[in-house]
Image: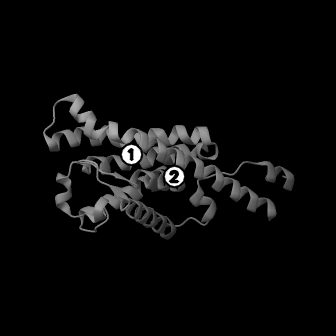
Amino acid sequence: MSGATLAARPSTGVLADRLLPRRSTLVDVAVVVTGAAVVALLAQASWRIGPVPITGQTLGVMLVGGALGMRRGAAALTTYLLAGLAGAPIFAGGMGGPAYVLAPSFGFIIGFIAAAAIAGWAAERAWDRNFLLAMAGFTLATVAPFVVGVPYLAAMLGLTDLSAIAAVGITPFVVPGLIKAGIAAAIFPVAWQAIRALDARR
């Protein structure tokens, strides 16, 4: 196969595979832990607007899932959840510990695992290299936490009225969620362009 043909082939894998091409168990553990740390850091960007704050967690989930892929992304968010429950102050507002399962927002953290998997699934299919496809994938990832988070919130707060549930658990997060999906969707194509530019110089 000629060098020209090789150069014309599209990049494969997710960003982590391109930046760390030598896969091993140690590398996978390192990127999973790093992913959990990224989400923990962004979780501290928090705005309390009610029982569930607006945080940078969702952006972190999309970035980590998209960069690591479906399985490692889900593993990173599982690590984040377990570390927080073990007492690490890594949830929004520096919270942590087993009692956090009683927080109205805990269901969203459970849902982050599926969100990271969805973002990773999209990235594994190269959706993250095109803004519109990336936006579609990350929007799906943004929706996933609500599937668990909203019923969990309603149960913790004892809410049964659908309008009240939507007012505290859905409506305030729609626009911020789309903005964060847009940020992630803009970042990944630029990152892939940078990688292609580096490849072209080699």
| Secondary structure beneath label 1 | helix
Cβ–Cβ under 8 Å for marks 2 and 1:
no
| Percent x, y of residue 57 | 39, 54
Q: Looking at the image, which residue is at 27% across and 48% down?
A: 52
Of 47 and 13, nearer the camera is 47
Sooner in the amino-acid sequence: mark 2 or mark 1: 2
User: Which residue lies most toward the top here?
Assistant: 162
| Percent x, y of residue 47 | 33, 54
Say few, some or many: other residues with alpha carbon within 10 Å of mark 2 (under 14 / 14 to 19 / 20 or more).
many
Of 102 and 172, nearer the camera is 172
Query: Does residue 2 appear in the picture of this structure?
Result: no
| Percent x, y of residue 27 | 51, 68
97 left or right of 137 in image: left
Looking at the image, residue 76 lies above or below residue 141 = below
Which amino acid lies under the numbered mark 1 shown in the image of this protein? Ala
Q: Looking at the image, which residue is at 32% across and 37% down?
A: 170
23 left or right of 59 in image: right
Q: Looking at the image, which residue is at 45% across and 62% down?
A: 35
- Asked where in the image residue 192 lies, by quadrant, the reply is bottom right
Say few, some or many: other residues with alpha carbon within 10 Å of mark 1 (under 14 / 14 to 19 / 20 or more).
many
Looking at the image, residue 107 lies above or below residue 200 = above
Of 79 and 162, nearer the camera is 162
- Asked where in the image residue 87 lies, by quadrant, the reply is bottom left
Residue position for label 2: 69
Residue position for label 1: 114
Which amino acid lies under the numbered mark 2 shown in the image of this protein? Gly
| Percent x, y of residue 196 | 73, 56
